[in-house]
Amino acid sequence: MAEVRNPGTWRALFRFELSKMAGRRITWVPFFTIAIIAALTTLTFHYAEFKIQLKVLSAFKLDFKNKNEFANGYFMAVAAFNPLFQLLIPIFIAVASGLMVAGEAEQGTLRACLIRPVSRSRLLFSKFTVLWAYTMLLTLFTVFAFTGLGVINFGSGTLYTMNAFYNNGLEGISVIPSDELPGRILLASVLAAYGLTVLSALALLISSLVESAAMAYVITLAVYFAFYALRLFPFLEFLHPYLFVTHMLRWQQCFYSDVKYGDISVSLIHMSGYIVAFLSTAVLLFKERDIKS
């Protein structure tokens, strides 16, 4: 385990936690996984005929002769963001978070860290800071990998998105000019990373309470997908504004014809509240935790 100089300082703690995360092989698995998925998506995109998409677009009076008129690099990237940010990356974040506290408690290294002259709250905040940085890096890597490969292989152009797929209404197609897309994609990546930070705070809270890393990320994913399922039930629409998952998905509104800045602002306030609530609870409970190993 790396040695910490002046462990009471934020810089020392941050560097200490960063070195531990960077030293875990599993930390880098998501980046290789995303790179492989991006490469396979690009290869598949070359041979896909998009017959269903052509029919759907024609139903909205957008009669394209072939896929080359709409299936550009931006189309590939934005289409990939939905499954990645809703399903795959949350799993990576849950695993990384589970190792931060519960994993170290399981290995016996957490007790050694607390023997040093450092407060538990400061230690937990430093872990959250590293986790936030990891979340941001993974999100930006995903965005740049898919957007870069997409534009290089298929060029840029106008983006056509089905509103129903991006929680922007049940009908209609959004048409976004090519010159607006770099800014929108950047904004979407920041919002997606901030949404995943909410999950990071929740995962860190759960990791602070359980004894093993496996239990931490299993419980985290169970909670996340339970709320995600509630988000899909139309008869629970009155509940949707209070679910943290709803606000985590606000990045999707960057791909509506007109960016819904009002809704985005409301979601930023909600997400900030969730982060403060989850992290404060984690600190309070972690202070009372008996670290036996």
Image: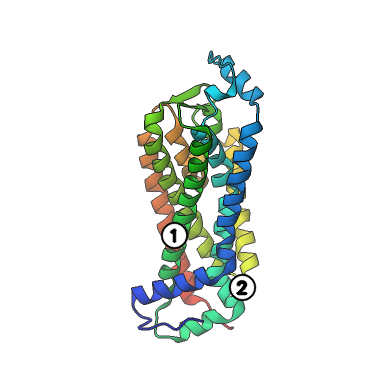
Three-letter residue code for mark 2: Glu
Tell whether label 2 touches label 1 (CB within 8 Å): no
**Is residue 292 shown above or below 51?**
below
Observer able to see residue 214: yes
The location of residue 144, given as percent across then percent down, is 47, 46
Q: Which residue is drawn at 43% across and 56% down?
A: 275
Front residue of this view, candidates 91 and 199: 91
Left or right? Give the position of 159 relative to 234: left
In the picture, measured across the screen, residue 96 lies left or right of residue 140, that is: right
* Residue type for callout 1: Trp
Place of residue 292 in the rendered image (x, y in percent of width and height, measured from the top left):
58, 83
Image x and y of residue 17, in percent: 45, 72
Give me the residue at 54% from left, 46% from top: 85
Q: In which quarter of the image is residue 84?
A: top right
Q: Please, which residue is most extreme toward the front here? A: 153
Find residue 99 and report its image quarter: bottom right
Q: Which of marks 1 and 2 is nearer the N terminus?
A: 1
Location of residue 250 with respect to 107 vertically, above or below: above
Q: Can residue 224 be seen in this view?
A: no
Residue displayed at 63% across by 39% down: 43
- According to the picture, the residue beneath numbered tag 1 turns out to be 132
Label 1, label 2: how far apart the Cα atoms are: 22 Å
Q: Where is residue 147 in the image (x, y as percent from the top left)?
A: 48, 41
> Which is in the foreground here, disc 1 or disc 2?
1
Task: Establish if 109 lies above or below 149.
Answer: below
At numbered mark 1, what does the secondary structure look like: helix, strand or loop? helix
Is the residue marked by circle 2 packed among few (<14), some (14-19), or many (20+) residues within 10 Å?
A: many
Position of the C terminus, as image quadrant, is bottom right
Q: How many labels does the image show?
A: 2
Please tell me whether residue 88 is drawn above or below residue 121 in the rendered image.
above
Name the foreground residue: 150 vs 198: 150
Residue identified by numbered label 2? 211
